[in-house]
Image (tube, rainbow, N blue to C red):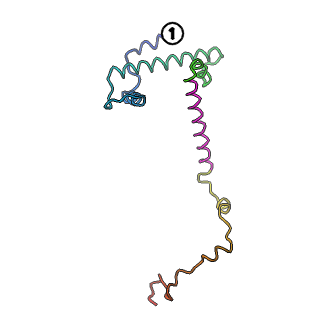
Amino acid sequence: MEPRARVGKNRGQQNFTDQELQHFLFAHGDVGDGQSLETTRKVLDELLTDFITEMCFEAARSSQLAGRQKIKLDDIKFACRKNPTYLGKIQEIFGKKEEIDQAKKLVDMNDDKITKSNVKALEEPLGDADDVMDVDFRTVGGKSGGTGTGK
């Protein structure tokens, strides 16, 4: 059976939840009271499903021509080559993903790996200027404070 024929079996069934569709509509300017029309959500669901299906078929065709059975990111990029907006958005998202991965690596490298040698490297050497600030705060006005002996 042709893969596209299998897609026709699911016609009329909703693939995305109402909440997902509602968030998508709100993000793209639907200024309702929080609930869009049922027909609007059904049409959006059908459009999104068709778009994703066609994009996957195009990417699968590209990978098949390359002699692979699995779809790679390059196949999706190739499928979007005629629409620079889609291609630019894909590249932007993967650029951000790369930045996030690099930030995670930095946090993982520094997290819970502080040793004594690292702490000593972080400490500043004390000079003579710091001796001026050393004041004994236990003796105030000739009386010893804080001992609780009452002397």
Task: In the rendered view, tell whether residue 78 sits above or below residue 2.
Answer: below
**Who's the residue at 48% across and 18% down the image?**
51
Query: Is 41 on the left-hand or right-hand side of 85?
Result: left
> Is 40 positioned to the left or the right of 4 in the image?
left
At which x and y percent is residue 74? 62, 23
Tell me how many marks there are: 1
The answer to if 99 sits in the magenta stretch is yes
Task: Please tell me whether residue 130 belongs to the stretch shown in magenta.
Answer: no
Q: Which quadrant of the structure image shows residue 61? A: top right
Q: In this view, does 104 lie above or below 61?
A: below
Residue shown at 40% from the left, 14% from the top: 11
Please give the name of the residue rendered at 37% of the width and 16% of the height, measured from the top-left corner. Answer: 12
**Vertical comparison of 112 with 89: above or below:** below
Residue 89 place in picture, x, y as percent: 55, 28
x and y, in percent, of residue 130 in the image: 64, 73
Indicate left or right for 54 with 45 as reference: right
Q: In which quarter of the image is residue 92?
A: top right
Which corner quadrant of the image does residue 121 belong to? bottom right
Q: What residue type is labelled 1?
A: Glu
Q: Is the magenta stretch mostly helix, strand or loop?
A: helix
Helix, strand or loop under label 1: loop
The span shown in magenta is 86-109
Taking depth in this image into account, of 1 and 10 the one nearest to the observer is 10
Q: Name the residue under label 1.
A: 2
Give the farthest residue toward the bottom: 151
Q: Where is residue 38 in the image (x, y as percent from the top left)?
A: 32, 22
At label 1, counting other C-alpha atoms closer than 10 Å, the crowd grade (few under 14, some 14-19, many 20 or more) is: few
Which residue occupies 59% across, 29% down?
91
